Amino acid sequence: MTGLLKIADSLAFGGRQQQWLHDSETLACRMRFSVFLPPAAAHGKVPWLLWLSGLTCSDENFSHKAGAQRLAAQLGIALAIPDTSPRGETVPDDAAYDLGQGAGFYVDAVREPWSRHYRMYDYVSRELPALLRAEFPLNGRCAIAGHSMGGHGALVCAIRRPQDYVSASAFSPICHPVAAPWGRKAFAAYLGDDEAAWAQWDASLLLAERGCPLPLRVDVGLADTFLAEQLQPEALQQAARAGDARLELNRHAGYDHGYYFVASFIDEHLRFHAEHLLT
Amino acid sequence: MTGLLKIADSLAFGGRQQQWLHDSETLACRMRFSVFLPPAAAHGKVPWLLWLSGLTCSDENFSHKAGAQRLAAQLGIALAIPDTSPRGETVPDDAAYDLGQGAGFYVDAVREPWSRHYRMYDYVSRELPALLRAEFPLNGRCAIAGHSMGGHGALVCAIRRPQDYVSASAFSPICHPVAAPWGRKAFAAYLGDDEAAWAQWDASLLLAERGCPLPLRVDVGLADTFLAEQLQPEALQQAARAGDARLELNRHAGYDHGYYFVASFIDEHLRFHAEHLLT
């Protein structure tokens, strides 16, 4: 593997929490990612969860704050955590937190100046999984999950290529980005003004059109200040009905958009995926 | 209470994770701290764990990275997490990470320019607990714990005033600071050149001299690069024997100095303290 470089490696819950650098062809830049390998990975290939993070995040937010390693170690599930955009001085950026670096939105950009590097969908759905399965003790059973912008990414990946995953879940996802300010801003920049082309990156539109054979779980907090305008879980729920998809949507009174919400329910998501990863 | 200002409040595991500002008389500056109140705190006073963090940390490192809230919520134990030094533009600092802001070492400084603000022992052992018990639903049963520099602080607090705590524990503590580079540098700055005065801030010297009636637990990682030179757990173990103290010292192969080690064993520490907090 060209340029796969380990930069951190700590024992955690009997497994290994590692951070790696590699040169991504898809993104045309050096990328960092984290993996957690449960104790069982020392003895053979294990199933794994691909986690997509939200706006402003790197691979470290979920690694540090979600507390997922404890139960993942017990269940024998690996965690793979990419960054949220291409990175580096030569990569286009924007001063706003919701565009450019830290805000790749898991789409393949077609518009300048973004199209050369901003191909996060291709990266997280093809290049990175291939690298991970070649270089780490991961088997062919993969689930996908994410938070906020990463929840959008996880749902879009799962609906577009359900054959690649056994299950998908999201915390506080941007469910209908073509109708949300964050999504409209990012899609206009990365995809251009033709809104018809945006539909293939919108979980609610995709799900209504194509359905999805995978079990889907979404959790949102009712004290999330982004819920009504940016997240719109009702759109996803309606699409699931229209597309005949198995969506479990859980609303939690009092929880907000932050990582304490993710930490509070990550065990439930891991057990949801374990049902499909381990059987 | 003068200037007690809530700046963050999230539901977490059914409890409240909060961040507060207040004007500390002891430290002569505005201070931030975090508290986690378990669900049981909505119905009455609960026992609590005072956590002291290590070099470079604020109240956020433990709050974000240790994953302690999950089991604390179940056990009905509150967590109180102060900052690691006085803060602010008017507070003396040093360019090094191991002196000045972020490195208060839980001593009461007597030397200029530190003596006006750097009184972290007095703050964490007197002013802050009094404020917490006056303003939050905390009962009189308190345990103390910490990591690295904060492990040193927790042990020193417990040995100097055992009547204030029911139990004490530490991850990777600086056990014998008068003989360790971090400790010698900080003590020389804060306490002056008379090394005889340092002994009252050294857990191993204090324990050998005074003993300690509290149950003590210490965990260290054998892959911790600071273990031999900076931490010296053997000195504490010898002191416990000399002082007839109940010290459980656990050595863990493969674990390093970081927060993944803390996260891996925080549940064991919480259960250790729960034995004494809840009975």
Image: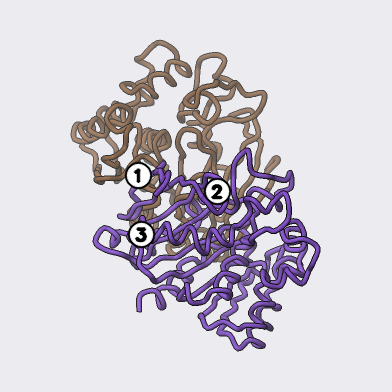
Chain colours: A brown, B purple
Q: Secondary structure at mark 3?
A: loop
Q: Quadrant of the C terminus of chain A?
A: bottom left
Question: What whole-number distance in Å separates the C-alpha atoms at marks 2 and 3?
Answer: 19 Å
Q: Quadrant of the N terminus of chain A?
A: top right
Disc 3: CA contacts within 10 A as few (<14), some (14-19) or many (>=20)? few
Q: State which chain disc 2 sits on.
A: A
Q: Which of the two residues, B4 or B142, is positioned nearer the viewer here?
A: B4
Residue A83 versus residue A184 in the image, above or below = below
Q: Which of the two residues, A122 or A268, is positioned nearer the viewer here?
A: A268
Disc 1: CA contacts within 10 A as few (<14), some (14-19) or many (>=20)? many
**Left or right: residue A31 compared with residue A203:** right
**Nearer-N-terminus badge (2/3):** 2
| Amino acid on which disc 1 is placed | Ser
- What residue is pinned by disc 2? A133
Q: Residue B18's x, y, as percent?
A: 39, 49
Labels 2 and 3 in the same subunit: yes
**Marks 1 and 3: which is nearer the front?**
1
**Nearer-N-terminus badge (1/2):** 2
| Amino acid on which disc 2 is placed | Arg
Q: Which label is found at residue A169?
A: 1
Disc 2: CA contacts within 10 A as few (<14), some (14-19) or many (>=20)? some
- What residue is pinned by disc 3? A279
Q: What residue lies at 76% left-to-right and 66% top-to-bottom?
A: B180
Residue A229 versus residue A10 in the image, above or below = above
Q: What residue lies at 46% left-to-right and 27% top-to-bottom?
A: A107
Q: What is the tally of numbered marks visible in this picture?
A: 3
| Residue A41 in view here | no
